[in-house]
Every structure is written in C-alpha cells, then in structure tokens.
Image (cartoon, grey):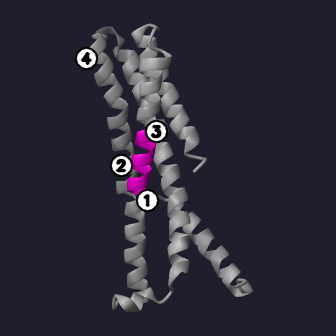
Amino acid sequence: HAPKMADTQDDDIFLKTQEDRAKELPGPTTQLNYGAALALSALPVFLFYTVYKLEDALVVYLVVSAISTLLLATAYAKVTRAEMIRIWTLRKRQNPNLHKKYGLGKDQFEEKCKDLTHKEVLAFSLFRNNFTFVVFFLFFAFYAFRDINPDFCYAVSVAASSVLVWKFSDWF
C-alpha cells in the first residue's frame, strides 16, 4: 500500500531525530571504540616485534599505531551511526503495537529496543571493521609487501589497512 503523507512526514522527522541522536555517541561507546581500535592497532606491533625483533622502530610503531587507532575508532563510529539509523528505522516501522505483547508502556519498550539496537549495532561495527582490518593487514603484510624492509612493511600494511577500513566505513 502507498504510504500516507502523514506517515512520510513522521518518518522524515523520526530520521532527522535519529540522525541527531546518533551523532552524539555515548561516552562508553566512544571509549569502547578507542579501546578496541588501540588493541587492534597494537596486534601488528606485537607480531612484527616478536617475529622480526624490530626494537629500533619504536617511533614508527607509536606513530603508525596512533594514526591507525584514530582511523579505526572513526570507522567504528561511522558504521555504528549509519547502522543505528537504518536498523532503528526498520524496527520502528515493524509493529507499532508490539509493546503490548510484552506488557510495557510504549516509551519504556522503545527505550529497551533502542538500547538493544545500540548494542547489536556496536557489536556489528566492531566485528565488521576488525575483520576487514585483519584481512587487509594479513594480505598486505604477508603477501603484497612481504619482500620489502620489515619496518616499511609494517608501516605500509597497518596504514593501508586502517585507511581502507576507514574509507569502506562510508560505503555500508
């Protein structure tokens, strides 16, 4: 059936409100994004440090890891925002009377759904971006750049993987 004009206007207002809310990620989410990004950025350091014994490249490790952390955290936030808007919009349209099934008030049900949706979206964002980073990193480090200097290989592999994850976060 064709949407009514009021439905379309309500959807536009709802999307605008969700976009505004999604821009301000809660503190724990931002901390989780940076923590996960730092951990993921540190794994290649551990790998290159233990395998190649590159002790004199500490400055390179720090600079590349810091840049990678910022790019990955930004990618997590971008995917979380986009998916939150997409999924919440779909859930909002599904069944407006679903709160009655669970014996909750409409506002209380919406709040619980938003919380659940946020957790699902955050987990998806972490999984997708981390998986993409690891695949790119392994490809660059052990296939594409395997024959070059290990210091340069580390820097290029981590930087390229981070930039690609950051760039692909706009696509989905």
Q: Which mark is residue 132?
A: 3
Question: Mark 3 or mark 1: which is in front?
Answer: 3
Q: Which mark is residue 50?
A: 4
Q: Crowding near pointer 2: few (<14 within 10 Å), some, many (20+)?
A: few
Q: Which mark is residue 96?
A: none
CA separation in Å, label 2 and label 1: 16 Å
CA separation in Å, label 4 and label 3: 23 Å
Please give the residue where the numbered disc 1 appears in the rendered image: 121
Tell me the magenta residue range: 121-132
Q: Amino acid at mark 1?
A: Val
Secondary structure beneath dot 2 equals helix
Q: Amino acid at mark 2?
A: Gln
**Rendered position, 105 above or below 172:** below
Residue displayed at 43% across by 84% down: 107
Q: Is residue 20 magenta?
A: no
Q: In the visual, does 1 lie left or right of 52?
A: right
Please give the residue where the numbered disc 2 appears in the rendered image: 31
Q: Amino acid at mark 3?
A: Thr
